[in-house]
Amino acid sequence: MSLNIAIVGLPNVGKSTLFNALLKQQVALAANYPFATIEPNTGIAQVPDARLKVLAELVETTVIKPATVEFVDIAGLVKGASKGEGLGNQFLSHIRETAAICHVLRAFTDPDIIREGAVEPSSDLAIIRTELQLADLATLEKQREPKGAASPEEKERWKTILHFKQSLDQGLPLSWSSLTLAQKLVAQELCLLSAKPEIFALNVDEAQVGDSGALIAEFAPKLKVKPDQIIVISAKIESELAVLSDEDQQLYLADLGLEKSGLERLAEVAYTTLGLQSFLTAGEKEVRAWTISKGMTAPEAAGVIHTDFTKHFIKAVVASYTDFIELKGWKAVREAGRLRTEGREYLMAEGDVVEFMIGK
C-alpha cells in the first residue's frame, strides 16, 4: 500500500527544505525566491520503526525493510492559483493523485527569507484552501446530471455532487473526516483537492520546537483543526539531523528535548489522519513493516504483500509484538500457547507479527 503525501504551501514557507530533510538528501532546490520548484519533486522516505531492529536481532537477520511514505514537493501556490496565477493550474494537478495534503505553514521569524504573500498561519492556510476549493468547483461544474433511466447509484452520485457544490459555494470545506463513505468515494473518483485528508506542519524557529504542546494548543483553534492533525517542526533542524548518524541524531534530539524526529512525528500524524496501521513480518530472510488500513481482514492484509495472496489465503499465524519480544521469537511464543491461528474474518491489529499460510 502506497502512502503518498503532497507538501503544499505558499512560496518560501520551507516546503523544499523540509522535503530534502525528510528524504535525507538534496533532491529539491531550496532557494530564497518564489517558484524555485517548478516540476514536483518526488521521493520515498523510510518510516522509522524501532520495533524492526529488535525483531531482526531475535530472528537473526540483517535485512530490515521499514514501511515507506512518498512525499511530493508541490511548487508554492499563490492567490489566484485556481485561475492559473503562478502556474497554479499545473501545480494543482500534481496534488490530485496524492492520498493526503501536508500544509506547511510559516511560523518562523527569519526576516531574511522573502515572505511572498505569507503573513501568518491562519490567513496563509485560508489562501491555500480557497484555491483548492475554487479548483474543485471548476471540476464539479463540469459534471452533468444523469438523464433518462438513471440508476439509483447515478442519482445518488449526482446528489452528492450537488451537496459538494452547495458546500463550496458557501465557502465550507469538504472535510474528509465528516464525509460519509459514499461521499468519500465520489470525492476520490473526482480527485477533489479540498476533500483530501489534511496534516498541518508548523515550521517554527529552532528555539520553539521544544514548546510543541503549547504551540499546538495555540494554533489548533486558530486553524480550526484537531490538535492531532498538527505537528510542530523546524525544517532547519530537520536539515541538520539529516546529515547525522542515527546515534548522533538521538543525542541531538535529546538536547532539544525531543523524543522523535520530524519524519517520525509526521508519519504518526499521517497514519492517524488516514486511518492506517502497520503489521510486521519476521523471518530469516528479512524483517519488514507493512502499511494497511485499519479494519482490514487478514486476507486483505496478505494481499498487500502480493495480490494473489488474498485469493489463495488459508490462514494467518499471529503473535502480538509484545509477546514476540517478551518470549524471544516464534518457537517460544508457540510453546507458551500465545501463537494464534486466525482465519479469513480476522481483523488485523496494530503491531501484529504475522506469517501468512498461502495455498496454490
Image (cartoon, grey):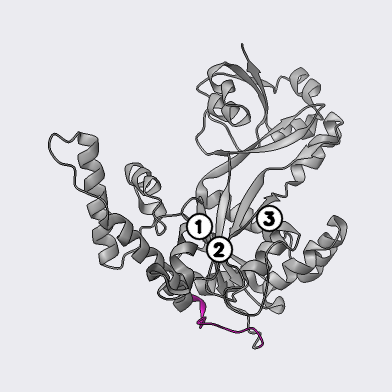
Q: Is residue 120 magenta?
A: yes
Of badges 2 and 3, nearer the viewer stands: 2
Total tally of numbered discs in the picture = 3
- Label 2 close to label 3 by CB (< 8 Å): no
Residue 47 x, y percent position in the rendering:
69, 49
Give the labeled residue for mark 2: 74
Residue 98 vs 342, above or below: the answer is: below
Q: Earlier in the sequence, mark 1 or mark 3?
A: 1
For the residues labelled 1 and 2, say whether their Cβ atoms are less than 8 Å apart. Answer: yes
Q: Earlier in the sequence, mark 1 or mark 2?
A: 2
3D distance between C-alphas at marks 2 and 3: 21 Å
- Which residue position holds label 3? 264
Q: Quadrant of residue 89?
A: bottom left
Q: Of tags 1 and 3, which is closer to the observer?
A: 1
For the question of whether residue 257 can be seen, the reply is: no
Point 39% across, 54% down: residue: 192
Q: Position of residue 28 (x, y in %)?
A: 67, 64
| Quadrant where the image shows the N terminus | top right
Under mark 2, the amino acid is Ile
Dot 2 or dot 3, earlier in sequence: 2
Q: Which residue is mark 1?
A: 94
Look at the numbered disc 3 and give the secondary structure of its residue: helix
